Image (tube, grey):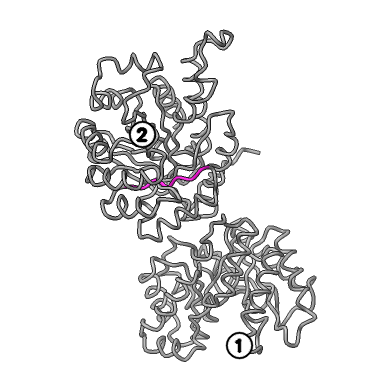
Amino acid sequence: MAFKQVPQKFTAKINPLTIGEGADAITLGGENVLPFYSFDAAIDNAPKIGIEISDNGYAANIPGIAEFYAGAETLPEIAKKAAAAPGVDFLAISMEGAHPDNGDRPVDECAKLVSDIAAVVNIPIVIEGSRNVEKDAKLFEKLAEALQGKNVLFLSAREENYKSIAAAAGLAYSQKIGAESAVDINLAKQLNVLISQMGVKTDSVAMNLGSAAAGYGFEYVATTIDRVKSAALAQNDNMLQMPIVTPVASETWTVKESIVSEEDFPEWGSSEERGINMEIATAAACLAAGSNAVILRHPESVATVSKLIAALI
Amino acid sequence: MGKFIVIGERIHCISPVIKQAMDTRDPAPILKRAKEQIDAGATYLDVNIGPAEKGGEDLMKWAVQTIQSEFDNIPLCLDTANKKAIEAGISVYNRSKGKPIVNSADAGDRIENIDLAAANDAIVLALCSKAGISSDNDERMGYCQEMLERGMGLGMEPEDLWFDPLFLVIKGMQDKQMEVLSFIKDLADMGLNSSGGLSNCSNMMPKNIRPIIDSTMVAMAMFCGLTSAIANPSDLRLMETIRSADVIKNNTLYADSYLEI
């Protein structure tokens, strides 16, 4: 008997979320099929890749990265180089230097920095937090104001600070909100409910469901993303139909496999190659589980994952 | 499994307010009840225009368009003995949020409503009875098979036949309740969808008792595999029970605010 293909497309779909403005704007999500199942129905918006820099610059301790950014002195110059890397769809700025224990950069200074970047970069911008909930609440309010009209995604609205971030970034300045939970499906849904109850439209929200480097509890990340996607599509759960954005670099560039030196572990080979491989493997696994965007640091990882996506969709 | 589907039962011509609104084509009372039910969590709304032998076609068209245009094409269950009125309703029905439901067919005089559903790519509520109440589950299953075969013979997907076990009134038929639940389990084991008029089980009970009985019955029936019910979504206890059972069955992902959404 001939094989009869039954397309597994759902009546529900992931909300399309557009960030950035003008010709360089990108749209995350919008699909009504499982990740990469473009044989079931067209996937209009392929998963996107962000390149990550921070308010402190780039990861200068990684030789290849330092080489890539060579000649870029100021943050806007660094941002311009990052934005021009092959395969990049958006620029992610981690505000790590604003953390009280990590320099405590004042809010106004942060606003000046990101405004200067936004003035020279055309691709969409995603702001990652300082990882301090009190600081982020204040910081995002100011950055949302400074980046008015740029349609920026603020990635770290957490259980502790979603109210002020949703009110400022989401409602007052019409930016996009990323609800962040740490590998907790029930909290992920709850945060979306709470943010929508504040009046932020569900189609202005993305989810960061948490991440881990491959081998470091990644099974939990994969099953969380997977369960959320199936609730969104198969169960038509409109509190989980937000596109998923997964910061990968911040997890993979801290694990032993990526950072121990070749001198200490000669049998493991080049540490930079290991780091790139971890970043690519983790990103590929997140995309296969259902992330609509991943955030990477090494230009070589960006280029490779971009080729992977292009080959599959 | 998807979420339990509540078909809101409150747009019914047996209510004097609704009857008058239908007679005078006054949208306000109908839209008010529609909104209350949607806000309370109804997925479908039943639109019962009665036998509607005269003017039923016009009335059903008007009701479908009035409700769907106001509430983002909420899916509807077209409830009348007048087949032409159901067809007229479907002719103006917007199916972007779900197929129309034909309410209802049985294995007796109303079996042709299956043909109607098949011809119009609709869902049909199929009562597992012929004339009066089936005497046991063998009889119910016989009717179920008969209707399933008829629908599939006409090209329907099995999931578009929602079998109604017929909930029986507890006051008077207390000894039959477990049999009905067991039949729901049989339907679920066959992978079939099911629905029915839930509140029939609490008929003739005091007003304060009915929500308790209805919500207990729905929980037990959902455990057995019931996938939908025609019920009153404005009954808070009932809706809380359904939402909780949906969580326990993993039909919907839990969040602390699950009762609010």
The x and y percentages for residue A9 are 50, 47
The image quadrant of residue A245 is top left
The residue carrying pointer 2 sits among few (fewer than 14), some (14 to 19) or many (20 or more) residues within 10 Å by Cα, namely many
Q: Please say if B71 is above or below B27.
A: above
Q: From the viewer's perspective, is A182 left or right of B105?
A: left
Of marks 1 and 2, the one in the foreground: 2
Closer to us: A29 or B84: A29
The image quadrant of residue A129 is top left
- Identify which amino acid the numbered label 2 is placed on: Ser
Q: Chain of mark 1?
A: B
> Pointer 1 and pointer 2: residues touching (CB < 8 Å)?
no
Q: Is residue A181 magenta?
A: yes
The x and y percentages for residue A90 are 33, 33
The x and y percentages for residue A6 are 56, 44
Instruction: Determine the main secondary structure of the stretch shown in magenta.
Output: strand
Magenta region: A176-182
Q: Secondary structure at mark 2?
A: strand
Closer to us: B222 or A19: A19
Q: Secondary structure at mark 1?
A: loop
Please name the residue that numbered disc 2 is placed on.
A94
Distance from Cα at disc 1 to Cα at disc 2: 59 Å
- Identify which amino acid the numbered label 1 is placed on: Lys
Q: Chain of mark 2?
A: A
Please name the residue that numbered disc 1 is placed on.
B207
The residue located at (41%, 45%) in the rendering is A133
Q: From the viewer's perspective, is A40 left or right of A83?
A: right
Q: From the viewer's perspective, is A219 left or right of A24?
A: right
Q: Which part of the image, by quadrant, shows the N terminus of chain B?
A: bottom right
Q: Say how many tags the image has.
A: 2
The residue carrying pointer 1 sits among few (fewer than 14), some (14 to 19) or many (20 or more) residues within 10 Å by Cα, namely few
The residue located at (51%, 17%) in the rendering is A274
